[in-house]
Amino acid sequence: MNELIVRIAGTAGQGVISSGDIFSLAAARSGYYVTTYRSFPSEIRGEGQCAFQLRISQEKTYTVGHFSDVLVAFNQKAVDVNVKHLKSGGILLVDSDEVGELSGESFMEIIKYYVPITTIAKDVASVKAKNMVSIGLIAGLISQIPMKEQFKNDIRRRYAKYSEEIIDSNIKAFEAGYEYASSKLERHDNLNNISMSKSGEKLIMSGNEAIALGALVAGCRFYSGYPITPATEIMEWLARELPKVGGVMLQCEDEIASVTAAIGASYGGTKAMTATSGPGFSLMSEAIGLATMSEIPLVVVDVQRGGPSTGLPTKSEQSDLNMAIYGTHGEGPKIVLAPMDVQDCFIQTINAFNYAEQYQVPVILLSDAAVGQRRECVDLINFDSLKIVNRLKHDRTKDAGLYVRYRNTKSGISPIATPGDEGGAYVATGLEHTELCNPTSDPEIRKMMVEKRFRKLETATHEFISAKKYGPDDAKIGIISWGSTTGAVLEAVDMAKDSGYKIQALYPRTLYPLPQEWLQDFLADKEIVIVVEHNYTAQLLHTLVYRCNSINKDIKFFEILKYDGSILSAREVYDRIDKIIRQQSLRYTFSNDTTEHQYKF
Amino acid sequence: MTEYKPNDYKSAVKPSWCPGCGDYSVLNALMGAMADLNLNPADTTIVSGIGCSSRFPFFTSTYGFHSIHGRALPVAIGLKSANPKINVITVGGDGDGFSIGGNHFIHASRKNPNITYIVMDNEIYALTKGQNSPTSHEIVTKVSPYMSVEERVNPVMMALSFNTSFVARGFSGDVVQLKDLITQAISHRGFSFVHVLSPCMQYNDKITYDSVKEKIRPVPENHNLSDRIAGMQLVLEVGTYYTGVIYKQERPTLGDKLNEVKAKSQANLPVDFSVRDIVKQFS
């Protein structure tokens, strides 16, 4: 076996997340692929349960996996909530100072270790160091994977801003856990059989960090935003890093100010971005239309969470697709992209800036809490091969006549001047306007300008609008996903292959404009098409797929939908695919399903 | 060096305002002020929201951004922060600035960007043909057919309470004074606010040139410009509009602060520091 899945669970405030962070960083820096998932309650402290799952592997994985090999539980509730996620034959490690003897059916098939984690932590450091003892214990149990020194490095790095004493006590707690596991815990084959070879140097970051870094690499030098879960990390990261390269991060009074400030900055010639989540994205709708109408490049990131209204601030959902595509009043071009994993957050953010600059449109990047807040490995960046696009500037040396900002060109794209450019003065406006920027309601000019704006993306269709396929071309069963559910779908396709099902997956690289030709081609010879989304109404299916299915009217469509705030695992997707194929039942939702289908983190 | 005349700032577009509108005076005063300061039109942007007065940018030869209702200030702040060499002048009306965009006025004052904000206050929504605005007197309109139910806001008092770093009031009936106030406002380093009593001939008979003339008095010569409380006392005087500069405070601008942030963030960085170095934190 060349992967290991570990889950650490406890009460918020017990250091679950920080131990998970250290674990994943140490694994990535030791040369393994890492995918993580963290769940935490809205309250930073309190009675809420939180869990951190990480999957360490030799090859790239797209999800955090389903069942874990090792579960560390700090208290009884953590055991109760999480034991169902443990593999049969998996290892449950509990703090015996908090948890009594475990008996009953759910504990029959698993290996239990009772370790006085609190006592050990108190003996060598303090009760706060329980999490360090725990990762020491796991490190000791998997000592055939050489990460011990890296663990210590990452503990030092994590607590670097604290006193030497605090760093030492954390290291001591880690060592004590490691020693305990090595000397007192019997090693089982389930863990002994795990072996992984290193796969070379990689970066490790969260999806939100990948978006922030992507923006910086794409040339973004202005960010304006308003704090909102689960997007705030983008703002925090850029607040720290943007000024280092001469950029500006501006905290605004609300999301309307954030997006209009970004538009103002972009009008002023600087690549600009704002990031938010559902409620803020709703507030930004009108201004996104302004960017469309005044043809100002703009990147808006929506790290989706459960809605409507305040909804589920810390939980992931994919329910803003309709708003991203149709949300602004009126009609006009914009581009909607969605990253499928952390690596893709980086890539799609650069794409977002490139498209915004090239077509002078707003680009909406639909990330979500699931991908935004999990850490994964990302390939090293090859700066020399990166394509960075800058807007087509008005060049007075070539075009010395009267500057016509909104010139009705063949491509629809008109050269843009920037305040400060001599001979380029123009008025950007949200009103319908002539080529020379004057307000107009003349029917012929109106028609011409609507068509000019849309033409920008008609030319774009041939340049970047696409989808990716995975699996055999002759499959009669198709599965379509977008954004962060794609990882689970791709892994489910592999699982289905092992069971003898031939399935092909398709995921759009651009959600709007829709990769219509790709979809039609994909649908042409499918008999069953399953759409997988984290929402209730199957937005992709209704918005896009049905529209494209002009060729094959015999397709049976199925929906796999989850909207309980938790994240689809590949196992869950596979189980539903299996059921759909066996029973051809038209709709599988999760929250209303029987309890055995509820997978709560 | 080019010497700009007021007419150099005039665009080919004829203002769409009604005859007698107070906003003509503000346009003339601003063009005069820009000429006095010899601002290069290519280095100057006039930003506005929506409303009669917000049509302003179309009538000048500078760069312009006619944005959306209430949002002129954040657009202007984004522009100025990203491109500090541009002279940014924000214009708008009372509905745009104190109703839909009211929140931005508070926070623009907090940020103190080096921009100017001129509000043409006609105490009415005129572009939509006459409804109550946040500065309307008790007035019967189609949306208040029986009576008004809200109090007026006092824009100058608002500015003083937000500690806007330059606060002045002018009147469309006095272009000479107005030009001087706008010149001082643009010259001020920081967020400068000029409240202009600007009559609407069409939809509001509660604010006319004659009625305003009766109520205005120049700010007393012995008024201490750095005394915010004294400014408030002037502004709260019932039945009188004091015109002139009411408050002025020199303090670091948003641009100064952003430069300080940059300097702090770069303090220990090598000279050739680049994005490539930032990536290293992820390895």
Image (cartoon, coloured by chain):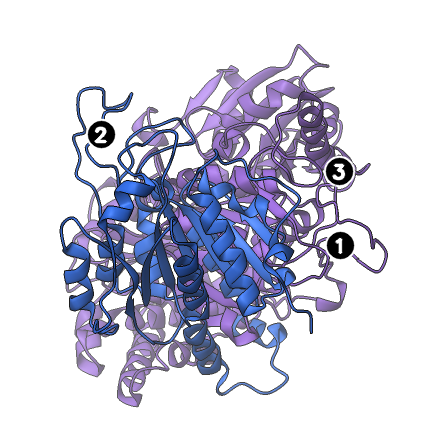
Look at the image and tell me whether residue A460 can be seen: yes
Inspect the image, locate mark 1, and give the three-letter code of the amino acid beneath it: His
Tell me the distance, in whole angstroms, between the alpha carbons under discs 2 and 3: 48 Å
Asked which secondary structure carries label 1, the reply is loop
The chain assigned the colour blue in the figure is: B
Q: Which mark is residue A461?
A: none
The chain assigned the colour purple in the figure is: A
**Residue B197: percent from the left, percent from the top?**
33, 47
| Mark positioned earlier in the residue sequence (3 or 1) | 1
For label 3, the residue is: A412
Q: Is the same chain shared between marks 2 and 3?
A: no
Q: Which mark is residue A394?
A: 1
Q: Quadrant of residue A22?
A: bottom left
**Residue A148: percent from the left, percent from the top?**
44, 77
Callout 1 environment at 10 Å: few (<14), some (14 to 19), or many (20+)? many
Cβ–Cβ under 8 Å for marks 2 and 1: no
Residue shown at 60%/39% (left/top)?
B14
